[in-house]
């Protein structure tokens, strides 16, 4: 936990994060959550500097996640952890996790020792994701890759309040602008927290991209990768008006409900979607239909 976290919240997270059978399932049942997609939280495999240990730890984590999923039929799915310190091993582990363990995609906690997923050595990972037909969920990570002077004197800005969204959104934009989805048009990336600041900047991305010269121009406008290759979830979004705006900007098929349990109250997350001024048909797509299609649940 970051040092500036309120003690009561930290204690609650310490109790809830490792729990499956008691608190988690009870919270799901209380709010009509049929299926929850599990993943390894931050700092994750990405924080391990030793590649050999990263491979071992990812295998252990994925076996544990698969055991939970198989032990609770119909209640859980899971995203694989990947040892991206060794890209070839990461591809092998992704294929094992999906084909042998039945996991439904991968989750990466932002950077890997300061390396980003637009770099050429990770192209095989995108190929494998496309081939397997599963998404990569790009999640905020810790510790940070570098020191931002902007944060000095304001520790409250460092973490989930602001910097995690900014750095993860920046990572996602690197992936888009590098042409990953031109090379791998069938690959899908999912961004939490309403898209990590990006969806409401799409028109500006297009207008500014049109004014610059790049060595390898994109085949489409930056905004056109959203909804096709980039999807967003409502994790951490507790305002009905923002969910409405996300549907308007991204399209009803590109927004997926997520509760961000245990960091947010499930009642608040569910309530925000229920209050949204959307048709019942669109709410159903956001609540479960889009995830069911993407993850083949």
Image: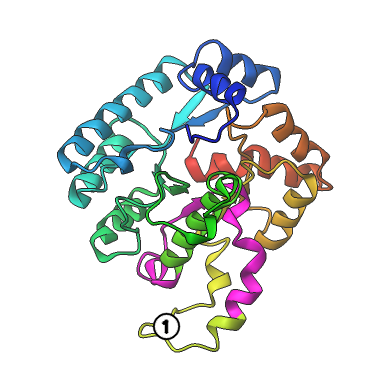
Q: Position of residue 50 (x, y in %)?
A: 18, 41
Q: Position of residue 264 (x, y in %)?
A: 64, 32
Q: Is residue 254 visible?
A: no
Task: Out of 176 and 51, give the one closest to the viewer.
Answer: 51
Q: Position of residue 44 (x, y in %)?
A: 36, 37
Q: Does dot 1 land on a helix, a strand or a loop? A: loop
Where 217 sits versus 106, above or below? below
Where 230 sits versus 97, above or below? below
Q: Is residue 243 left or right of residue 58?
A: right
Q: Is residue 286 left or right of residue 129?
A: right
Which residue in the protein does label 1 denote? 217
Badge count: 1
Q: Which residue is depicted at the point 79% across and 37% down?
A: 274
Q: Which residue is depicted at the point 75% across and 40% down?
A: 273
Q: Magenta span has 201?
A: yes
Q: Which residue is depicted at the point 83% across and 39% down?
A: 275
Q: Residue furthest top?
A: 22
Q: Which residue is depicted at the point 35% across and 64% down?
A: 118
Quarter-wise, where is residue 196 in the image? bottom right
Q: Residue furthest left?
A: 52
Range of magenta residues: 177-206
Task: Out of 5 and 75, give the one closest to the viewer.
Answer: 5
Quarter-wise, where is residue 171 in the image? bottom left
Q: Magenta span has 145?
A: no
Q: Position of residue 84 (x, y in %)?
A: 26, 48
């Amino acid at each position: 936990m970051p040092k500036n976290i309120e003690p009561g919240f930290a204690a609650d997270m310490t109790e809830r994060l490792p729990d499956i059978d008691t608190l988690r399932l009870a919270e799901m049942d209380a709010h009509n959550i049929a299926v929850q997609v599990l993943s390894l939280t931050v700092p994750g495999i990405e924080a391990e500097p030793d590649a050999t240990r990263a491979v071992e730890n990812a295998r252990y984590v994925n076996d544990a996640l698969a055991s939970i999923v198989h032990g609770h039929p119909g209640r859980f799915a899971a995203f694989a952890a990947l040892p991206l310190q060794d890209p070839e091993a990461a591809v092998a582990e992704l294929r094992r996790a999906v084909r042998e363990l039945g996991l439904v995609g991968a989750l990466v906690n932002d950077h890997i020792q300061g390396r980003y997923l637009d770099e050429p050595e990770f192209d095989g990972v995108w190929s494998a994701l496309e081939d397997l037909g599963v998404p990569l969920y790009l999640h905020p990570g810790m510790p940070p890759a570098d020191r931002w002077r902007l944060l000095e004197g304001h520790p409250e800005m460092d973490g989930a309040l602001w910097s995690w969204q900014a750095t993860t959104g920046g990572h996602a934009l690197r992936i888009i602008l590098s042409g990953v989805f031109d090379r791998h048009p069938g690959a899908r990336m999912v961004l939490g927290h309403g898209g990590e600041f990006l969806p409401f900047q799409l028109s500006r991305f297009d207008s500014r991209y049109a004014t610059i010269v790049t060595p390898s121009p994109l085949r489409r406008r930056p905004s056109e990768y959203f909804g096709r290759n980039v999807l967003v979830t409502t994790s951490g979004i507790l305002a009905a008006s923002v969910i409405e705006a996300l549907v308007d900007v991204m399209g009803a098929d590109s927004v997926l409900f997520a509760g961000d349990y245990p960091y947010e109250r499930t009642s608040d997350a569910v309530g925000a979607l229920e209050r949204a001024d959307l048709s019942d048909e669109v709410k159903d797509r956001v609540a479960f239909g889009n995830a069911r299609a993407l993850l083949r649940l």
